[in-house]
Amino acid sequence: MTVPRFRLFGWIDSLRARVRELDVLRQLRELESRARDASVAFRPHYLVRAAQLAAATNRKEQALTLYGTAIDGYLEAGRARAAEALCRKVLSEYPEVVRARRTLALLALGRGDYDDAHRLIQEYAEAARKLGDPTALTGSLRLMARIVGAGPVLHRAAVELRAGGDSEAAEMVLDAAAGAREDLATGTVSGEWSDALRAALLAPSELSGGSPPVA
């Protein structure tokens, strides 16, 4: 019996799609394997390539996981600028992502760019309340307040804590700010680059308990 042409073409298209799918899976496995075997410096390169492939083939969740791991990899390798650039790329493609906003805010705090940090904390808090885990947001804001020590950025953290319903934490932050003004004036701010990096590497689940230690 002759197979109708339209059924034959449909079968061929299905076979081609399956072959393409298997090829993508093979490439992803290979890139992830290379990432595992690579040095700390080169690991993010393979993870970004894998994330781009996953994104191009409509594997959004896998792409976001790979991008997140690549960002952490850049931070662990001491390549903060690369991590920031990748955070911005992720946000341009997936505006709903929350953790990349937290990372950008923490890195701005760590390098002492308080004007940028003020804006980024506000953007992060708004996105987290709308799209993310409010408990992790509280932990993040408390951490940011501890890192910055005093000044307008600390007050922004207190404002966002109050907006999230944690008035007690907001008052604690403001009380701490009053005692830290002298340190800020003498240049001995409690915030340090290493603290910001450690905080940026914390997963949301590690922030849900309140105020995890930085050191």
Image: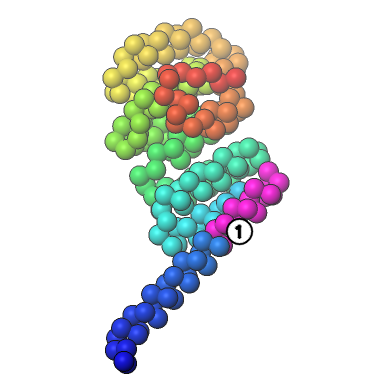
> Residue 65, how many percent across, how many down?
48, 46
Q: In which quarter of the image is the N terminus?
A: bottom left
Q: Where is residue 69 in the image (x, y as percent from the top left)?
A: 54, 43
Magenta segment includes 38: yes
Helix, strand or loop status at disc 1: helix
Q: Report the span colored magenta.
A: 27-42
Residue 189 image offset from top left, x and y in percent = 57, 18
Query: Magenta residues: mostly which secondary structure?
Result: helix
Q: Identify the residue position indicated by label 1 in the image.
A: 30
| Label 1, residues with CA under 10 Å away: few <14, some 14-19, many ≥20 | some
In which image quadrant can residue 192 be found? Answer: top right
Q: Is residue 1 left or right of residue 136?
A: left
Viewer-closest of 110 and 4? 4
Q: Image height check: is 163 above or below 29?
A: above
**Residue 178: percent from left, percent from top:** 45, 8
Can residue 81 be seen here?
A: no
